[in-house]
């Protein structure tokens, strides 16, 4: 998880049955080939909702996903 200003920059190895709270910043997910990854989102607090934002420095990743989907 990281913030654009660099205030927060932490990597967590997450294993089976682990829980990580992501309260701010960007959080990427990587899974090794041959393994499955599952994300469970829980919304809590006063302002519940799914407010997704991508890091502008990595918009090319989403663009490539769209290219790959079209070429299936």
Image (cartoon, rainbow, N blue to C red):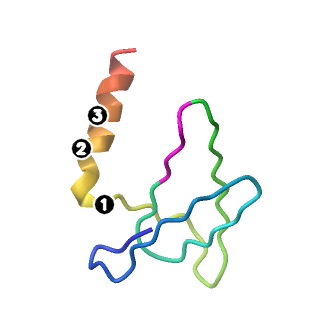
Mark 3 and 2 residues: CB-CB less than 8 Å, in contact?
A: yes
Magenta stretch: residue 63 in it?
A: no
Label 3 neighbourhood size at 10 Å, few (<14), some (14-19), many (20+)? few
Question: Picture coordinates of residue 42 (x, y %)?
Answer: 67, 66
5 to the left or right of 46: left
Q: Quadrant of the C terminus?
A: top left
Q: Main secondary structure of the magenta part?
A: loop
Residue placed at 34% from the left, 24% from the top?
Answer: 68
Q: Nearer the viewer, residue 1 or 50?
A: 1
Residue 40 position by quadrant = bottom right
**Residue range highlighted in magenta:** 29-33
Label 1 neighbourhood size at 10 Å, few (<14), some (14-19), many (20+)? few
- Per the image, the residue denoted by label 1 is 55
Residue placed at 35% from the left, 58% from the top?
Answer: 54
Label 2 neighbourhood size at 10 Å, few (<14), some (14-19), many (20+)? few
- Per the image, the residue denoted by label 2 is 60
């Amino acid at each position: 998880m990281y913030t654009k200003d660099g205030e927060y920059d932490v990597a967590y190895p997450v294993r089976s049955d682990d829980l990580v709270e992501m309260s701010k910043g960007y959080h990427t997910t990587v899974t090794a080939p041959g393994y499955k990854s599952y994300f469970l989102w829980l919304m809590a607090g006063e302002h519940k909702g799914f407010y997704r934002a991508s890091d502008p420095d990595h918009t090319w990743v989403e663009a490539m996903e769209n290219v790959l989907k079209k070429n299936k």
